[in-house]
Image (spheres, grey):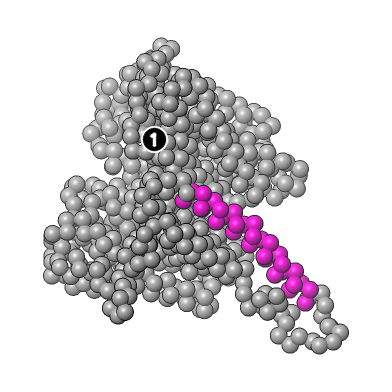
Amino acid sequence: MSLPALLKRWEALLFLVLIVVVAANIAESRYFLSVGNFVNMFQLSIEKCIVALTMTLVIIGGDIDLSVASVMGMAACVMAYLFHLGAPLPLAILAALGAGILAGLNNAFWIAYVGLPSLAVTLAGLIGYRGIARILIEDRAVGGFPLWFNTLGQQALVGPLTLAILIFVVLFIVFAFVLHGSAFGRLVYVVGSNVQAARYSGVRVGLVKTAVFVGSSAVAALAGILYAARLGSVRGDTADGFELDIITTVLLGGVSIFGGKGNLVGVGLSLLVILSLRNGMGLADITGNTQNYVIGGLLILSVLIPNMSQDLRNKWKGREK
Amino acid sequence: MNWLKRHVRPEQIREFSLLALIIVAILFFGSLIDNYYSFRTFNRIASSVAIITVVAVGQTLVVLTRNIDLSVGSIVGFSAYFIGTLIANHNGVNPFLAIFLSVALGAALGAVNGVLVAWGRVPAVVVTLGTLAIYRGVLVDLSGAKTVTTDSLPQWLVDLPTINIAPFGGLDIRILFALALVIVVIFQFITGYFSFARLFYAVGSNPDAAQLIGLPVKRVIFLAFVISGALAGLAGFMTLARFGNITVEVGRGLELNVVAACVVGGVNVFGGSGRVTGAMLGAVMIGTLEQSLFRLGISEFWRDALLGLLILLAVASDAVILQRLRAIWARTELKFVADPAPATGARPGAPR
């Protein structure tokens, strides 16, 4: 690939933004470059980062999964509920992961085999799985987990890295391989760019979608358990509203909402941009509310600017003729 | 059967079945709750449904064009809070001016969405996900964490939601619900009978084809977002009138209920099919369930799970049953085409 083509790529633009943000942060605060700050920056929203990886697959596959945050909450609540019924915690964790997989199978059944739009099915899931979480825990806050569980969620495991960060790194590598280095990954792209063509070329679309949605919910359940471990307590509204942040991250990473386009490098860069932007603004005493709408604006501009520059270029070419 | 096929469309059968489902739900709850069949129940359901219905009408138009407006909750909050602050500071504001301002404010915010989607070619999910955060964020920043309280509002606004427009025979129809009904009727009439409103359907069922035959696709999408914003602005005023106490959090999460109402009401999320009355029935179904479960006193925690199940069932029946019905309808029409010269007794009114 030639240099200009490389520069025009989405990832190049994101990288540039990242450099600007990081440079501004370094100028702003001398604490930014410390290892502690970096680990902290990741640790504070590591669960969203983990779910963003599977969301990337879902959106590249031409679908959307609005139910991830509710699955996170449901898994955490299933675990807390069973633990307080007297089940040993490892068993409760397994049951919570199982609940996540069941939720994924439910989503996949309606989307892949009945053929319903994923937006509608996962909207029902968003409300329904949250409902199950509420039925189990009601309006209590359930804590009192064993010490090892909270330690695992909060303390560094290897060097300065916590378990959740390690899981994120491993999953990033695994998903990068699955999406960009395996036949299954190509199938996800094919299904996302043209589902009819995929079906006519003999791709088992139903199986691909099932795998993607079950994976999405299973990873969301894992993230929910990690979130519970980090906070040390579980409530019915655990992880409420996370889906918007997660989808924003993925779309900012250059993944097309219409499917078939995007990659994990872009999503990784987008994660870094959002995290360091939030971190830098936090260090500069800018409130979380302002951070929210700066990132909202960034999301819109990220699609608007390439579109407008293309329009201008077309106009300019037209004048040349 | 032929008469049925000629005069009733599959979409209407679906709406009737939703209506039947609502009646079954009401009978079910009526057998469990004492004094359920009363105007008090009706009023509770009606006033909880009114606001969602108004926003859902606008959302229906947007969804018909194969887009989605997730920013409506923030627009409702924006309008309710700022119009509330205005009225609280200047108690003498003319009521109609206040309503006009809330609609205009909403329309302006909707226009921003519309421009970005139609001319900026940014997908609607991306735009409205962004403006969902931006509108709410600007609202929180500008508010300085103050709230609007009922005692700072003029008396006419406090009394507004209790005005009964049908004060005869014990009937009790509150003005906010009546307003919602009027809006549904107007938009149902317009989208059903005016050719320019059929553009919403044309653009949504096949955007490429609409572009190729020269329909003003961009202006139609823009208009849909402006109407959605304007109705959300009006809903903001209704929220202000109904609750009186307005914080910066008002309307948060409303977009999910609104989209749910549309989906339950049979508005296809891929655009091109669905009706305003359907969205209203969806809102009524959700409102009935919500209020009745509350009255039943089992546990409000069951509400969400049941609602999720209901949406899933509605969408599934939409896809499976409606497809079957359409196939039956289409087959009979094809028969007329395949049989151009019926041997005896030519049917005069048969579609060809």
Which residue is rendered at x = 51% and y = 78% of the image?
B194
Which residue is rendered at x = 31% and y = 50% of the image?
B136
For disc 1, the marked residue is A137
Question: Which of the pair B329/A139 is nearer the observer?
Answer: A139
Taking the image as drawn, is residue A138 in sight? yes
How far across and how far down the image is residue A266, in percent? Answer: 50, 35
Taking the image as drawn, is residue A263 in sight? no
- Give the chain letter at badge 1: A
For residue A110, side relative to residue B241 (left or right) = right
Please name the amino acid that badge 1 sits on: Ile
How far across and how far down the image is residue B99, in percent? Answer: 26, 69
How far across and how far down the image is residue B164, in percent? Answer: 27, 74
| First to last magenta residue range | B307-336
For residue A225, side relative to residue B94 (left or right) = right
Q: Secondary structure at mark 1?
A: helix
Dividing the picture into quarters, in which one does residue B287 lie?
Answer: bottom left
Question: Which of the pair B259/A98 is nearer the observer?
Answer: A98
Image label count = 1
Question: Which of the pair A111/B44 is nearer the observer?
Answer: B44
How far across and how far down the image is residue A287, in percent? Answer: 25, 38
Which residue is rendered at x = 33% and y = 18% of the image?
A36
Which residue is rendered at x = 45% and y = 35% of the image?
A74
Q: Is residue B319 magenta?
A: yes
Q: Quadrant of the N terminus of chain A?
A: top right
Dividing the picture into quarters, in which one does residue A164 lie?
Answer: top left
Q: Main secondary structure of the magenta part?
A: helix
Q: Quadrant of the C terminus of chain A?
A: bottom right
